[in-house]
């Protein structure tokens, strides 16, 4: 009877932590969408909200880690239960980093608010952010449902984000060469694109944690990476 009580208490505590993690996932999605809306619409107020919301992400990660460490200390979980707690802590760290990237995007609005749109940069950035937002939504679903197939699909989709980042790099490089006056704005846009691309990378890290949660090991295959910006001339 005592063992049943302990298992029930553990499951209850774990469920509370999972709920906090889902809150982080929802915030990460809204942050991606809102940061890009603020940029495209040059909405300084929304940009300020994005920056402030990052504090909520940080607080949630701290709360998750505290509860997870306490749960390990009190319940001393083994095998799958321990893997679950470790995976949750790693996922929360990835979501927190995504929040940091959206905050960085919002910060650059201060410089870009007075500049005109450059080429098709807005459309490309919106496509990138939409892909990452969907990846976050799906990877969190795969984590909760223990759906390794969906997690693998998310992991492969990151290549699409990388390729859009490559497109953005080429276009903005051309603009800077043709009109040096656009260099400052283009550099900020390149950093924004890189922030979105890195958010996509952290989403694939979450997908790998789903694999770890189910199999007890990380994927052994090399993910097909599409980011070529470091090798472009």
Image (cartoon, rainbow, N blue to C red):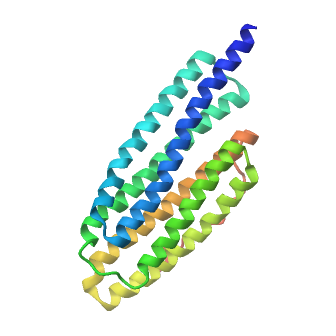
Residue 130's x, y, as percent? 53, 66
Q: Residue furthest bottom?
A: 178
Residue toward you, 199 or 120 = 120
Q: Position of residue 165 (x, y in %)?
A: 50, 73
Q: Is residue 98 left or right of residue 103?
A: right
Q: What residue is rendered at 32% in x and 60% in y?
A: 47
Residue 110 seen in the figure: yes
What residue lies at 71% left-to-right and 44% top-to-bottom?
Answer: 145
Q: Is residue 40 above or below residue 90?
A: below
Q: Which quarter of the rendered picture does the C terminus lie within? A: bottom left
Residue furthest top in the image: 2
Return the x and y of residue 70 as percentages of the image width and height: 53, 21
What residue sits 33% from the left and 53% below the top? 49
Quadrant in which residue 36 is drawn: bottom left
| Residue 230 shows in this picture | no
Q: Is residue 111 left or right of residue 38?
A: left
Location of residue 62 with respect to 219 vertically, above or below: above
Image spot of residue 99 (x, y percent): 43, 51
Q: Quadrant of the N terminus?
A: top right
The one of 17 and 79 positioned closer to us in this rendering: 17
In the image, 82: left or right of 57?
right
- At 46% across and 82% down in the image, what residue appears? 170
Residue 222 falls in image quadrant: bottom right
Count of labels shown?
0
Position of 103 relative to 196 (above/below): above
């Amino acid at each position: 009877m005592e063992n049943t009580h302990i298992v029930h208490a553990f499951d209850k505590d774990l469920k509370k932590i999972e709920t906090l993690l889902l809150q982080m996932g929802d915030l990460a999605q809204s942050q991606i969408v809102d940061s890009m809306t603020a940029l495209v619409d040059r909405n300084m107020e929304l940009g300020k909200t994005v920056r402030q919301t990052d504090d909520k992400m940080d607080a949630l990660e701290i709360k998750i880690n505290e509860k997870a460490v306490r749960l390990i200390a009190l319940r001393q979980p083994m095998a799958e239960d321990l893997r679950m707690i470790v995976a949750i802590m790693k996922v929360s760290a990835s979501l927190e980093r995504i929040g940091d990237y959206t905050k960085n995007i919002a910060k650059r609005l201060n410089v870009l608010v007075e500049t005109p749109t450059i080429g098709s940069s807005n459309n490309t950035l919106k496509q990138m952010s939409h892909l990452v937002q969907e990846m976050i939504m799906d990877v969190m679903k795969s984590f909760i449902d223990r759906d390794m197939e969906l997690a693998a699909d998310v992991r492969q989709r990151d290549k699409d984000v990388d390729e859009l980042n490559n497109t953005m790099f080429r276009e903005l490089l051309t603009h800077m060469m043709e009109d040096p006056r656009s260099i400052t704005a283009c550099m900020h846009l390149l950093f924004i694109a890189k922030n979105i691309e890195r958010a996509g990378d952290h989403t694939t890290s979450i997908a790998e944690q789903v694999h770890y949660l189910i199999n007890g090991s990380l994927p052994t295959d090399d993910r097909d990476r599409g980011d070529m910006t470091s090798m472009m001339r």
